Amino acid sequence: MSEINHLNLSKNGLVFDPRTGESYQLNPIAQKIIVLFQSGKTSEQAAKLIADEFHISLEQAFSDILEFQVQLSIIGLAS
Amino acid sequence: MTKYSKPSIVKISNPLYTKHGSGAQSYHPVRDAIEGVAVDELVKKYGSPLFVFSERILRQKYQEAKSSIESVYPNVQFGWSYKTNYLNAICQVFHDEGAIAEVVSHFEYQKARALGIPGHNIIFNGPYKPEAALEQAISEDAQIHIDHFDEIADIESIAKRLNKKVKVGIRINLNCGIYPVWSRFGFNLESGQAWAAVRRIAQSKDIQLVGLHSHIGTFILDPHAYGRAIDKISQFMRETESLVGYNLEFLDLGGGFPSRSSLKGVYQPPEVVVPPPQVYAEAMANGLKWLTTRKNMPKLIMELGRYLVDEAGFLITSVMADKLLPDGRRSYVLDAGVNLLYTSTWYKFKIEIEKEPTGISEPSILFGPLCMNIDIVDEAILLPRLERYERLILSPVGAYNVTQWMQFIQYRPAVVMINEKSETRIIRRAETLDDINRMENP
């Protein structure tokens, strides 16, 4: 998801989109996923890392990340 | 270490939000127990969804309302409004407190009788009283409040057949400055219809008018409406007594006191807009004064329903699915919906979560379990991200929901009562397929 590289992410969970001037608040898991995407990880890779770190199933992590990607698209942060 | 929760992102559109994002960390009320019994324990024992009633609140509400009215008028009788919630255990609590039964159908009349309430302790209201119901009520000396002229004729006919003079009240509707005016029940005062009914009954050999009844509406937020109604009825009572030549035995002011529920469209919270019963009593006091000076002080009957039972009822429901809608809103599918919450059309329930919220809140919509687009429990609520099977506790839901719930697609769930010792018992078990099929023939 290289299209989210332009987002500015703060440590307290705020995201600023310089293209639109809009700000968003993220929960800690969403922050981690954005960071993973910005570092070039694919959805599958990000799911594996999240599943390992939080001791949840890979299937759950992958479902949640896929839906999160849909949400990013709906609100215009990713295409 | 951060606990896992599903990823959430919320657009900051409220100017109150700061760079620290504190605005989105919204407070959300938490309830992990009802009357000292853990929600988790209730669900594990009785399932979800689950209606839960507090006996302590039922009794507290009754005593609070009764003592308020008695503080301004000494001769008060409460009639428990069966239609508001006619579960036997609920009715029993109010009968145990001293209420007689107020019913509006033959079914309710029979329910009261099955509970052991004698006919003379049943007020029979309503616009439709079938002949069989009237005959039973007359033969058992129930207190019938007549709704229309056809009913006068029906009662006369039965009275002749039973060779009995029947004591009755008439229901009166009037304009006391509130909207809407409930003009479809009883005889209208301003048009002269009520007076016509009095004259009609006064000439009857089979019926004797002994009381007047008025029920001005529901969820009446203006206590002075009762004062204005009493002023009008009092004048009418004087005129009636002058015509018939004796004092009437009772004045029934019906119900209509609100519970602490949020009526949709009323933007202030119920704690602000809903007056306590003492304020209603004080608004009624002046109008009632003249009755206290009479030799035979008439009985003042109150038929409170919603006020007494609504806040004693809770509905525990569980999150069964978490779905993102195409417009970006978060939605949840609950195991309880409009099938169990008939009053959700008019009231916005208080929704508490079982566990302390973590993370950010987002605009959410709560759907019920029905495969129907209209099944929405709350269309706009800020909620922290909920986990699957997490429970929500909705209140107040004690009034009208367990009488108007639907057996549509789903079974109706169990209803539990918690007594004042925090002991629980099922007062209505969950429905089964056999319950439904028993009434059908293949």
Image (cartoon, rainbow, N blue to C red):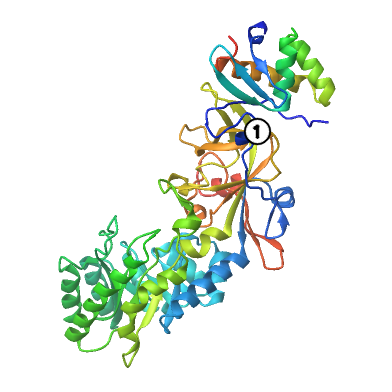
Q: Nearer the viewer, residue B155 or B254?
A: B254
Q: Quadrant of the C terminus of chain A?
A: top right
Q: What residue would you read off at disc 1?
A: B360
Residue B296 visible at all: yes
- Taking the view exactly as shown, the residue that stands out farthest to the front is B19
B144 over B309 or under it: above or below: below
Q: Nearer the viewer, residue B125 or B155?
A: B125
| Residue A66, image x, y percentages | 67, 16
> Which residue is drawn at the image coordinates 34% and 84% (left, top)?
B298
Q: Nearer the viewer, residue B118 or B222?
A: B222
Chain ID of residue with mark 1: B
> Which residue is drawn at the image coordinates 53% and 53% (left, top)?
B397
Q: Amino acid at mark 1?
A: Ile
Q: Nearer the viewer, residue B283 or B345?
A: B283
B439 over B146 or under it: above or below: above
Q: Residues within 10 Å of mark 1 (few under 14, many from 20)?
A: many
B353 over B256 or under it: above or below: above
Q: Quadrant of the N terminus of chain A?
A: top right
Q: Is residue B418 left or right of residue B14?
A: right
| Residue B258, image x, y percentages | 44, 60
Q: Is residue B21 left or right of residue B88?
A: right
| Residue B309, image x, y percentages | 52, 62
In terms of secondary structure, where does tag 1 sit? loop
**On the image, which quarter does residue B216 sit in?**
bottom left
> Which residue is drawn at the image coordinates 57% and 31% (left, top)?
B331
A37 over B372 or under it: above or below: above
| Residue B319, image x, y percentages | 64, 37
Q: How many labels sit on residues?
A: 1
**On the image, which quarter does residue B119 sit in?**
bottom left
Residue B368 visible at all: no
